[in-house]
Image (cartoon, rainbow, N blue to C red):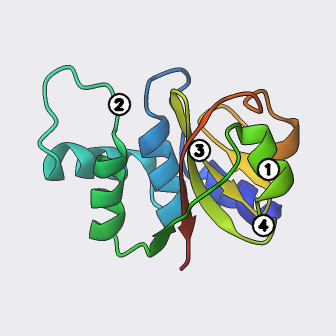
Amino acid sequence: MENIKNKYRNLKLAGSAPNCGIVAIAYAVNMPLNTVTSDFKEVLNFHGNWKGRTSTRDRKTLMDLYGLKYIQLEYKSNTFGKWVKNEMNRNKHYLVRVTNHVFNIDKGILIDQYSIIPAGSCNKLKKRMRDVLEIIN
């Protein structure tokens, strides 16, 4: 848990901005949030009043750029809570997308721009599952 908290401290998070995808990538690659944000803007040509909203394709593009290895996982559960209970491996690292949010699950701990908490006790358990990437490096 201490390793997770140390990586989290490097992010200098931006409250309620719609930047969960950027925060998730910054945590996964262990880079400063402002560096990842700049890379998103440059590589994906985001300009003007872009606040940080990303798509799965955008996140995969940056993960590929940083050399982050991942596997797209199939899942059976329709809600995050069921996935945590029935499918999540507590020894692995995931990038999870649920309805309107993206976050990391690292060794059973949910990490997003708001908090670090055990995945099974968060307020997102009823959210619909949309995408799961297992981070493998």
Q: Amino acid at mark 1?
A: Val
Q: What count of labels does the image hold?
A: 4
Q: Earlier in the sequence, mark 1 or mark 4?
A: 1
Q: Nearer the viewer, residue 68 or 124?
A: 124
Q: Name above or below for residue 85 compared with residue 48.
A: below
Instruction: Verify CB contact (< 8 Å) between mark 1 and mark 4.
Output: no
Could you tell me which quadrant the N terminus lies in? bottom right
- Secondary structure of residue under mark 3: strand
Residue at mark 1 to residue at mark 4: CA–CA distance: 8 Å
Q: Position of residue 17 (x, y in %)?
A: 46, 23
Residue 97: x, y in percent?
A: 54, 42
Give the residue at x 49% y 44%: 23
Foreground tag (2 vs 4): 4
Residue at (43, 33) in percent of width and height: 19
Whether pointer 3 and pointer 4 mark residues with C-beta atoms closer than 8 Å, the reply is no
Mark closest to the chain's N terminus, 3 or 2: 2
- Can residue 111 be seen here? The reply is yes
Residue indicated by mark 1: 84
Rendered image: mark on residue 89: 4
**Residue under pointer 3:** 103
Residue drawn where x is 55% and y is 77% of the image: 136
Q: Amino acid at mark 2?
A: Arg
Q: Is residue 123 left or right of residue 20?
A: right
- Going from N to C along the chain, the mark reached first, 1 or 3, is 1
